[in-house]
Image: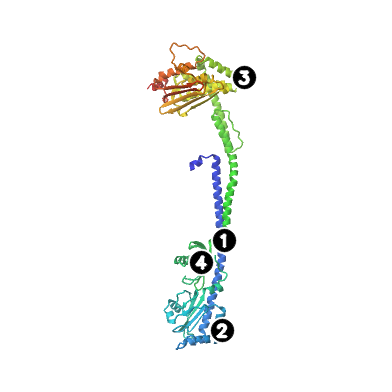
Amino acid sequence: MLRAYFNLSLKFKIIIPFALLMTVFSALLGYYAIQTSKTQIVNKVSSTNLGVVRVVENNMQSMQKAISNWVTVFAMDPYIQSTLQMEVRPQEGTLDPTLYNGSTTTLMNQMLLTGNFDYVALYGKEGPPLFQVATDDSSGSGTIQEIQANLIYKETAALRGAPLWFPLTSDNVFIQNNRKDKIGMTRIVRNINNGYTIGFIFVGVNQETIKAQYLANLYDKDHGIVILDSTGEPLLEAGKPFFKDGQSELDAIRTAIPESGSKVMKLDGESLLLTYSKGENGWQYLYAVPLSTLTKELNSIKQFVMLLIAVWLVMSIPVMLLLTMFLTAPIKNLLLSMRRFQNGQFDEKVDVKYGDEIGYLTQGYNSMVESIKALVDDAYVLRLREQEAELKALQAQINPHFLYNMLDTIFWEAESAGQEKISEMIINLSRLFRLSLNRGKSFTSVAKERELLELYLSLQKMRFRDVLEYEVDISPELGEYVILKLLLQPFVENAIVHGIERKRGGGFVRVTGTREGDRLKFVIEDNGSGMGEAELAKLIELPKESDINVAQDTSGYAVRNVHERLKHYYKDDFELTYDSKPGQGTRVQLIIPAVLSMGGSDDNVSTAYRG
């Protein structure tokens, strides 16, 4: 993946990191904004919820205080005290008329009018309650002996007159037929003279009563209230339930909450903002709100961030494309100039527009091109001078007709197009002569032979103008292999003379070279006029030693000469095949051994061929 990225163009190397960077930056900015908003919302709601918890705590303390005060006054009433101190237990139900008509009339009326109680029972030293009243049709009071055997009585007695609050379940010793869930309060009645226990009072308050009178408008389906007693057991739940009475949830709450404050907790698979406070009597007040309810409005911020990223990408890509095109345009111009320079245009020069790093690079490139051009010019002049003697010796071996035509072509080119092509043609011609001579050696490299072909064909193309097209496709890996000097050129010359010149409208010559195992394969083919069998047989017939060639056309002789040299050097270790039909062109295929240059003399090379 990383390698594929580095292989991309410079434009995309800039665009991709920039787009990723801005996307990540936008996402982080959005995440920070969401988290900050979430924290602020939680903090503000925590303050509000803590105020609600304080209200719940005050209301519940008011309820406890009101009931405790009423029970205290009721238990200290002289009539109640004298009744409970009697040695003989009064008959059941005999207290009812007296309580509503005697000194306790005001207390009883207050109980009925305020509706704070839903169940009250007064017990003596034994038997069922002396006085019992229920506002919700609950019934079935137990005896004092049954109550004294219960753990609640023992805990109540240990408080020595202080009230004990506890949740009242359906299965309890106080009310056998309990119609509604209640919070119970028990308290022993003591003799005001000596402090001995003389009775027991049980008060039950329906949870519905508490919710209606003390928790009204403080909870709903999204806000939950839980009240725990001093031991951590649930006394009352209102609104949204946020735990399933599981011990694990209770333990988590007990462990997490200090005296007061707020905390985000996950209970029953849901994240909640839990606000808590601990009252003076040890009761714990919990107020919970689902975090999703608080952060619901943050969804708009999330959508805005996603929209911002999308808009940013859509708008930034064209901007980045324009920016990168502006930045990479000088580099592209420099690269195109380098390619033209590689193709032989030594007069290349790139304009320097800015003084940045690319400008300095362009200045260095222009200086390098000028230096290389000067070196190339000097080298060509030097080579022309060195080859002057060889050219004079070669003149006797050059086809006069070909030389005449070329010189004539050069002349007319000079007349019609100025002097630019004259230099090019002379240089190509001198290079061709030098490669042909090869300093007297019989072998040359494939690279030099390919260069000779390209020079020869370029000169012929100048001669024939638009009539001749050619292609030299010899694999560069063959450059170091050695072959006979002027091995391929005669076949190319033959294709032009016997094929292209005779065809109206011009033609095409292609030369290909490949390596197949330990052999070199060359193919010369044209789309010229082709040859018949008789002409083809004459072309490949080896000449006799006494033959004298007086014709201007030397191409056929050169081809036969190549065949003779192949036989001389390679013996039978070569293949030379012809395929030609009149009007369909000619194809020549030559296969010879593949031998790398040993860096020695001509004798060493020829010895390597001969094995």
Which residue is tagged 3?
A: 415
Q: Provide residue 127's location: percent of width, then percent of height.
A: 44, 84
Judged by depth in the image, the label closer to the viewer, 3 or 4, is 4
- The numbered mark, 2 or 3, whose residue comes first in the sequence reads 2
**Please, what secondary structure does the residue beneath circle 3 have?**
helix
Q: Position of residue 267 (x, y in %)?
A: 48, 63
Q: CA distance from mark 3 to mark 4?
A: 106 Å
Q: Residue at x 59, y 31 (%)?
A: 349
Q: Amino acid at mark 3?
A: Glu
Camera-near label (4 vs 2) is 4
The disc, 4 or 2, on the residue closer to the chain's N-terminal end is: 2
Indicate the amino acid at tag 4.
Pro
Calculate the distance from the C-alpha at mark 4 to the C-alpha at mark 1.
22 Å
Look at the numbered disc 2 and give the secondary structure of its residue. Answer: helix
* Residue 400 drawn above or below residue 10: above
Distance Cα–Cα, label 1 vs label 2: 50 Å
The answer for how far apart the CA atoms under marks 4 and 2 are is 40 Å
**Residue that numbered label 2 is attached to:** 106
Q: Are marks 1 and 2 in contact (CB under 8 Å)?
A: no
Q: Are marks 3 and 4 in contact (CB under 8 Å)?
A: no
**Who's the residue at 57% across and 66% down the image?**
48
| Residue of label 4 | 241
Mark earlier in primary sequence (1, 2): 1
Q: Which residue is mark 1?
A: 41
Marks 2/3 in contact by CB < 8 Å: the verdict is no
Q: Residue 154: where, in percent of width, then height? A: 43, 78
